[in-house]
Image: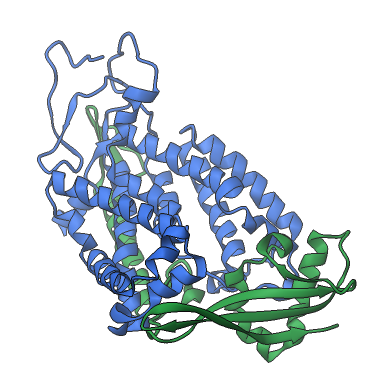
């Protein structure tokens, strides 16, 4: 139990949490406007088309109307943009989490549920608990570590449990069936349509997908280099899916960023500081080393000269 | 020097550690979330969102079975027949397919598609017929033959 707790709350630099927040909240804003603009149209649909999900029925959420959907849209857009700055992480974070969940209920209550954003929802619920974090902040945080760890767990669970669902609904026949052929014929790109002429390749791909999804939890036990390659493979998989059937799984890709050393973005995107300050809010660039496995923070090693860097 | 807060966090020097309570709450929340998700995957359905099974492309289609491609067609009062897209009605194709059981049981429900179209296109000619048509693509030995046929699943007329 202690080992599990230690692993779940392995500290990460606060800067990583800050960058994850920026990424996740900017995605929420972009999702509203660019990626799933169709959600907004649900407010205009006749009420009889509404098929509330269990969560909507349990919470007695009202059937979407144009004014309700517009209100959630604008509040969520403003809150997400504000939260992306990292200010008031708890108040703004919970506001975004609750509004986005309602937005998802509006999205999914019309006969089609998407399965690409469980990990993003976990990130939205976990990030408000991660405490204050600035983008240059190198102080290790355990609550930030937990927020990123559960996001990683949810992202990998999405793969592993997708394999479970295939075995539950399709059975072993899924492996040799025509699921990919079916998907490519319905919504394949030119590349995807071309692949339908090689059904043997599609069956092989189904074996490959099943193997990758079942083995995906190994990412947590791989050494650092192997883990980096595994995460790169996850991204490459989504690129391949997008190139063939134009499904991006972009919320899952955003959640996968919880595996990345996002704090390094500061070196590229933030203006360099001419000097660093001391004390608890010190913002020097890299006084901590990744631990042996490269998960989070290992033993702290001060640089000669008081830890100032830059 | 520890600065303990009520939020389950203690600070020791520069590192920010969780208190026993903060850690326990997080481990418990993680385990509850895992239990809900595993239960949803094992016995749940889409209705249990967000804890339902990740069943996208999870069903197995027999290799020789024809592939269904669903569309919504409409005829307006000017006699013009057209395909209604998501841009026309605000309804995704998968949502039509997801509610097909309700439409076939009660074709008058398709009037909601006409209403949705009218709301989004107030200047357009009203619709006098809406139908769900499935184009079946023939597949032989796992390859599409290029032949297809259309079957009207449900029709609504006011």
Please name whichever residue, A308 or B100, is drawn nearer the observer in this view of the structure: B100
Can residue A83 be spotted in the picture?
yes
Of residues A65 and A97, which is closer to you in this image? Answer: A65
Say if residue A51 shows up in the picture. no
Find residue A88 and report its horizontal and vertical position in percent.
Answer: 49, 35
Q: How many marks?
A: 0
Place of residue B44 in the rendered image (x, y in percent of width and height, measured from the top left):
42, 79
What residue sits 56% from the left and 81% below the top? Answer: B148
**Vertical side of A36 occupied by B100: above or below:** below
Front one among A289 and B125: B125
**Which quarter of the figure is the C terminus of chain A placed in?**
top left
Question: Relative to residue B8, is residue B130 drawn left or right?
Answer: right
> Chain A rendered in what hue?
blue
Is B77 on the left-hand or right-hand side of A221? right
When asked about the image quadrant of residue A297, the answer is top left
The chain that appears green in the image is: B
Query: Does B1 appear above or below A179?
Result: above
Position in image of residue A67 (x %, y %): 75, 55
Q: Quadrant of the N terminus of chain A?
A: bottom left
Give percent across and percent down for residue A11.
Answer: 23, 41
Residue A243 in the figure: left or right of residue A80: left
Residue A170 higher or lower than A47, as above or below: below
Most extreme residue toward the top is A274
- Compared with A68, A61 (above or below) is below
């Amino acid at each position: 139990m202690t080992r599990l707790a230690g692993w779940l709350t392995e500290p990460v630099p606060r800067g990583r949490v800050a960058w994850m927040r920026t990424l996740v909240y900017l995605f929420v804003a972009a999702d509203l406007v660019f990626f799933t603009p169709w959600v907004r149209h649900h407010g205009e649909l006749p009420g009889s088309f509404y098929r509330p999900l269990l969560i909507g029925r349990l919470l007695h959420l009202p059937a979407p109307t144009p004014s309700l959907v517009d209100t959630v849209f604008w509040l969520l857009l403003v809150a997400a943009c504000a939260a992306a700055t990292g200010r008031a992480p708890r108040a703004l974070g919970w506001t975004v989490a609750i509004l986005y969940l309602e937005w998802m209920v509006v999205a999914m209550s019309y006969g089609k549920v998407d399965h690409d954003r469980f990990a993003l929802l976990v990130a939205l619920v976990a990030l408000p608990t991660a405490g204050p974090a600035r983008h240059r902040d190198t102080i290790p945080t355990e609550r930030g570590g937990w927020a990123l760890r559960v996001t990683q767990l949810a992202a990998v669970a999405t793969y592993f449990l997708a394999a479970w669902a295939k075995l539950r609904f399709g059975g072993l026949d899924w492996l040799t069936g025509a699921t990919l052929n079916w998907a490519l014929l319905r919504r394949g790109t030119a590349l995807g349509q071309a692949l339908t002429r090689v059904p043997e390749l599609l069956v092989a791909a189904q074996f490959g997908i099943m193997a990758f999804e079942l083995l995906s939890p190994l990412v947590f036990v791989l050494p650092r280099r192997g883990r980096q390659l595994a995460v790169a493979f996850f991204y490459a998989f989504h690129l391949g899916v997008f190139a063939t059937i134009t499904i991006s799984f972009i919320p899952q890709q955003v959640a996968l960023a919880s595996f990345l050393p996002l704090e390094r973005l500061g070196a590229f995107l933030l203006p360099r500081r001419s000097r660093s300050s001391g004390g608890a809010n010190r913002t020097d660039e890299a006084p901590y080393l990744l631990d042996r496995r490269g998960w989070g923070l290992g033993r702290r090693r001060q640089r000669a000269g008081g830890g100032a860097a830059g | 020097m520890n600065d303990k807060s009520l939020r389950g966090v203690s600070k020791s020097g520069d590192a920010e550690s969780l208190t026993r309570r903060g850690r326990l709450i997080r481990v418990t929340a993680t385990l509850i979330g895992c239990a809900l998700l595993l239960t949803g995957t094992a016995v749940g359905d889409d209705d249990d969102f967000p804890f339902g099974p990740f069943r996208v492309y999870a069903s197995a289609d027999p290799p020789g079975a024809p592939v269904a491609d669903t569309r919504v067609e409409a005829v307006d009062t000017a006699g013009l027949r057209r395909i209604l897209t998501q841009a026309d009605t605000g309804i995704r194709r998968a949502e039509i397919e997801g509610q097909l059981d309700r439409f076939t049981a009660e074709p008058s429900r398709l009037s909601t598609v006409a209403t949705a179209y009218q709301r989004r296109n107030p200047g357009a000619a009203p619709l006098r017929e809406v139908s769900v048509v499935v184009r079946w693509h023939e597949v032989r030995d796992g390859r599409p033959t290029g032949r297809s046929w259309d079957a009207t699943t449900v029709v609504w007329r006011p």
